[in-house]
Image: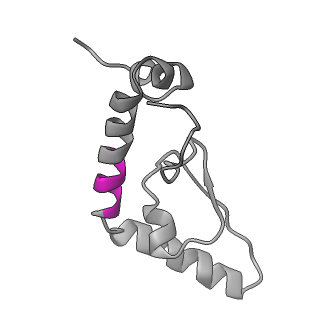
């Protein structure tokens, strides 16, 4: 069976199958914390810092949710697809 975003990453999906949604996000968090920024992420962060010293402002806009730009040192970051939030209690009884 093909799984879509709507099956895993929405409040409705959570209401139908909370344990599946928890498993999905737990896996994503595990993958994210195991990754490190690459040379491209570091170069963007260095460029932002260098231009900042010249009084110029840089905004890095990404659709990635892996936090690698932030890990590389980027300060002015807009993640247009959001981010994977830390786990928290929704108040629902499982």
Rendered position, 22 above or below 8: below
Task: Answer with left or right where residue 50 lies relative to residue 34.
Answer: right
Q: Is residue 27 magenta?
A: no
Q: Work out whether residue 72 or residue 6 is closer to the camera in this orientation and state it.
A: 6
User: Dividing the image into 4 quarters, which one contains the N terminus?
Assistant: top left
User: Dividing the image into 4 quarters, which one contains the C terminus?
Assistant: top left
- From the image, give the main secondary structure of the stretch colored magenta: helix
Task: Give the residue drawn at x 60%, y 84%.
Answer: 50
Q: Which color mode does the image show?
A: one colour
Task: Answer with left or right where residue 86 lies relative to residue 32.
Answer: right
Task: Answer with left or right where residue 25 lies relative to residue 61.
Answer: left
Task: Give the residue drawn at x 53%, y 19%.
Answer: 12
Rendered position, 55 above or below 88: below
Q: Which residues are magenta?
A: 28-33
Q: Position of residue 54 (x, y in %)?
A: 72, 86
Q: Position of residue 62 (x, y in %)?
A: 54, 50
Task: Give the residue drawn at x 46%, y 48%.
Answer: 64
Q: Residue furthest right?
A: 55
Q: Residue furthest top?
A: 1
Q: Position of residue 46 (x, y in %)?
A: 51, 80
């Amino acid at each position: 069976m093909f799984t879509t975003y709507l099956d895993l990453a929405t409040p409705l999906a959570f209401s139908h199958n909370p344990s599946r949604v928890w498993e999905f996000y737990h896996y994503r968090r595990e993958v994210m914390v195991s990754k490190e920024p690459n040379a491209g992420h570091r170069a963007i962060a260095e460029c932002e810092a260098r231009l900042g010293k010249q009084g110029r402002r840089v905004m890095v806009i990404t659709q990635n949710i892996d936090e690698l730009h932030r890990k590389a040192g980027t300060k002015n970051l807009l993640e247009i697809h959001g981010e994977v939030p830390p786990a928290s209690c929704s108040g629902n009884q499982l």
